[in-house]
Image: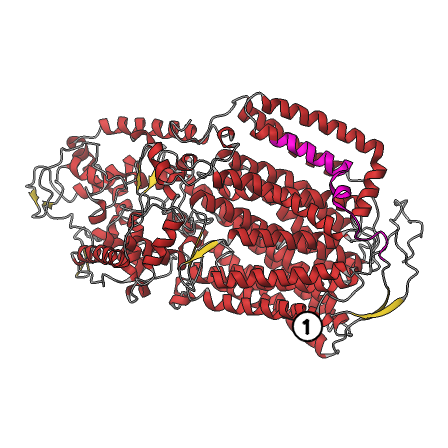
Amino acid sequence: MTSTAASKVPIEFNDKVVRQFMLASIIFGVVAMLAGVFIASQLNFHQLNLAEWLTFGRLRPLHTNAAIFAFVGNMMFAGIYYSTQRLCKCRMGNDTLSAIHFWGWQLIIVAAAITLPLGLSRGKEYAELIWPINVAVAVIWVVFAVNFFLTLHKRNEPSLYVALWFYIATIVTVAMLYIVNHLSIPTSWTHSYGIFGGVQDGLVQWWYGHNAVAFFLTTPILGIMYYFLPKAAERPVYSYRLSIVHFWSLVFLYIWAGPHHLLNTALPKWLQMLGMFFSLMLWAPSWGGMLNGLLTLRGAWDKLRTDPVIKFFIAGVTFYGMATFEGPLLSIRAVNSLSHYSDWTIGHVHAGALGWNGFMAAGMFYWLAPRLWNTKLHSIALANFHFWIGTLGILLYVVAMWISGIMQGLMLNQVTADGLAVKNTFLDTLQAIRPLMGLRIIGGGMFLLGWIVMCVNLWKTIRSGTPVNEVREVAVLQRGGTDTMGVKETFFNDPTACTFGAMLLVFGWIFLPPGADIASLVCAIVFGFLAVRRFQKTSHTWALWYDSLLHNYLPFTVLTFVAVVIGGLIQIIPTVTVNSAKNVEDRIQKLYEPLELAGRDIYVSEGCYNCHSQMIRTLVPDVMRYGDYSRLGESIYDHPFQWGSKRTGPDLAREGGQRPDSWHYEHLMDPRSMSPMSNMPPYAHLNTKPFDQKTLPRKIAVLRQLGVPYPPMDGTEIKMKALEQGVKIATELKKSNIVVRPDSEMVAVIAYLQKLGQFEQPAVEEALAKKGQGVPFPLSPIIPDNGRRANGAE
Amino acid sequence: MDPKKPSPNNEPQLRDHIYDGIQEYDQKLPNWWLFTLYIAIAWFVVHWLCYYQLGLGSSDTVVIDKAMAEMQTARDKQMESISDEQLWALSRDPAAVEAGKATFMTPGMCVTCHGPDLSGMLSGAKLPGLPLNDQEWKHGGKPTEIFKIVRKGSPDITKGMAAWELVLGMKRVSEVVAFVLSHHKEGEPITRAADSPGATPAAATTAAPAPAAAATPAPAAK
């Protein structure tokens, strides 16, 4: 297919940028883990909330963003830049782009590290960064993408290796997820409202959040595994066929699983069901990656004893297998009813982040450092020490979180003997898990210690060598059969036609009206059977087609994008465009008054959502503890939604009107005065700062633009309204001998908290008239949801 | 590494192409792995068929509404047995009073606002709660009236006491009331506070004038 008898040219790889990314990742790894150990300690020792910008609510986003984007991000770029150049047998596309990518990314990290502690936040998990930084991320990502595809374009290796498939999937999918989830309208240079609200925002957020795990923390690292593991083991990859099957099934299925973060909530049930079942189907594709990693070592297991790199890789892949088994388990609605909002989820993500990402990173760095600095690893003994203390640390962490999550879940579900009241207060359950949260600090600390040992080891390694850029003689590719595939050849052939045909029929089964749906399912099964028969007969041509696809990077990228885009389209479009009545159910939330809106924005920027959910699930223990289950309409105007993902404190969906203003004041000033043994940070600083009156008119104007039915009000009116309500609350507090400024953030937050859970019960038509900008999706009337449907909407 | 080297353990042939020194076997997919995938897909199809086409299984809202309605019925039944006499009798039962005291004194509960000695004071400072050891009652001093306040909270919760029924349950509420009553005598004078809400609410009425915002204990109530 290609001519290899071509002229040879020497190529110097751009290894400088690899070294830069690697060092950045190592340093930000320390930062992220240090922040993790610190905020874990804050949960047990509230005294560590040392200042307003060092509270748990503000630092937790810093920890997650540092771990994902700074630590794993830089590690991924190091791995991708190193392996792509070698797999393409050419230097990275453009040196300037490489440099812009590196420095731009570090600048973004610095900006994040400054803005997050300042409380500048969009209030969506792993998407907290404010809009100017979002724009920068998107731009830098595009720079990276252009640089990467430029490299593919000028490659001297005709065929794309499996690692590159995963990099391609990462680049296109992260771009899509990031842009859609960050669509917002600015209200100032530091604040914006996302264009989605309520359930739509929830769905988009977890489509993004789950797939940030999938396409930022998993697929690039799988690519790295496919390059560095066989390199280190010096063994062939176990199975090319398995690579194909698990790659395509993984990228296709992953996107669908997002709703498993919203199980048993007000999210329409068909989405919950899709989230659950696609997570279960995802188990095998995930394990395909693990198998290909582990079984590559067949015949070289002895290396496990001697080579620390192999140790880290194998432990990393094993943790990947463990976490991807646990994930589907936690996605089962019944299991999730216990595990969700608890430490179990925290344990799960850390098995992934520390075990999989952390160890794959360490293995890669130990392998890269001697090669990039032309020397030998300083100390194998220290690397082994790192391995063992890291492993023990993760195990301690994960086991502590399992026990903590299950215990707190069970305690929260306990009822009194007559079955009519909950048995334990939330604070009781918090006290019970404190020792386990303590063990978590130790486990995380051990992992951090191992990491620091690695820093020392690599520092000494680097000191003993000098940076070198590898130079290689490579044959220049004669572009005969490479990058010539057209649209027809890409889409109109047996493999794609059979796949898309079967898929279309399955979607028909899900969405078509009764009768036609079953017919579609029968057709899908028959079609699938015929497709398998056809494959068995002509598998050779299928294999040839795939081989030629691997010689064509653009068609490959397009097909990958199609595979990842389907799940999102099917889940999000009906929810975003559907007739609004479906999203309202029988209740619609009352509009936030200006002061309450100001309070809400403070609540969001303080990161209260990190510990408090606002979503009472359709579960008996939830309803007994927090009140009637949440309806979709009750958060329809929430930009961003605040359903939450973890309950370190109790749910607040119906907190409004449950306690006196004075209770909230005392509780915010010193949580332990009202809730002894609480671990909540104090928020006394709210008392000293005035709330932001200046941007309120602009904020309300933007919300009106987004479909929140505020009446027309001018700026003065809005500010007056806010102050009047503030005076009212301040006067009420005065009766309890509490003096607050009526324009303080404290008053605004109290106003917001007292508003939580207030709703009206409008006629559905009226609700429609109020928020009727939705264009009905053609398939909407038959969305198979007989569970949660607007009363009388049909 | 020689690509054409025969594999030592009867392994399948290596693929021809070598990527930067990395070779690939082309092993068959493990059967157990394939079956894991097939079973997950089949389970999806079967489950979806059962739920959406055959109508098996109830929706979440139906299940929860039913469970909460049953609880409400049981609560109403418990309420029937509550009377002034019964609560006074309970206040003379040392076991009930002791249990009530334990609940009262639990950090974060009654003691936080009403003080350990029920005086509404803590070391000279006034706490948010009213004193419970005098004879002045803002919302009525009959045992059933006290009982109602503990269960449902004060008429406007944002300006007074929170509702405790869902947290404590009927049994512990009656024990707490018994504990409070153990500081009083049956038939002692009851005075109304100066800022008492005008009309005396009818004792033991369960229909609390809860604002729309307040969580209703059970959806059946709406």
**Chain of the residue displaying label 1:** A
Taking the image as drawn, is residue A399 in sight? no
- Depth check, front residue: B172 or A762: A762
Q: Considering the whole magenta stretch, tell me its main secondary structure.
A: helix
Q: Which residue is mark 1?
A: A457
Residue A145 in the image: x percent, y percent?
66, 59
Image coordinates for residue A96, horizontal then vertical, percent: 67, 71
- Residue A482 painted magenta: yes
Residue A725 vertical placement versus A773 (above, below): below
Say what secondary structure mark 1 lies in: helix
Q: How is the image coloured?
A: secondary structure
Q: Is residue A684 above or below residue A587?
A: below
How many discs mark residues in the rendered view? 1
Front-lying residue, B216 or A577: A577
Residue A4 is inside the magenta segment:
no
> A789 and A485: which one is in front?
A485
Query: Could you tell me which residue is drawn at 70 percent across and 50 percent down?
Result: A557
Q: Give the image quarter of residue A275.
A: top right
Residue at 73 percent across and 48 percent down: it is A555
User: Magenta stretch?
Assistant: A479-507
Quarter holding the C terminus of chain A? top left
Residue type at tag 1:
Asn
Label 1 Cα neighbours within 10 Å, binned few <14 / some 14-19 / many ≥20: many
Residue A465, position in %: x, y? Answer: 75, 78
Against A209, is A631 above or below? above
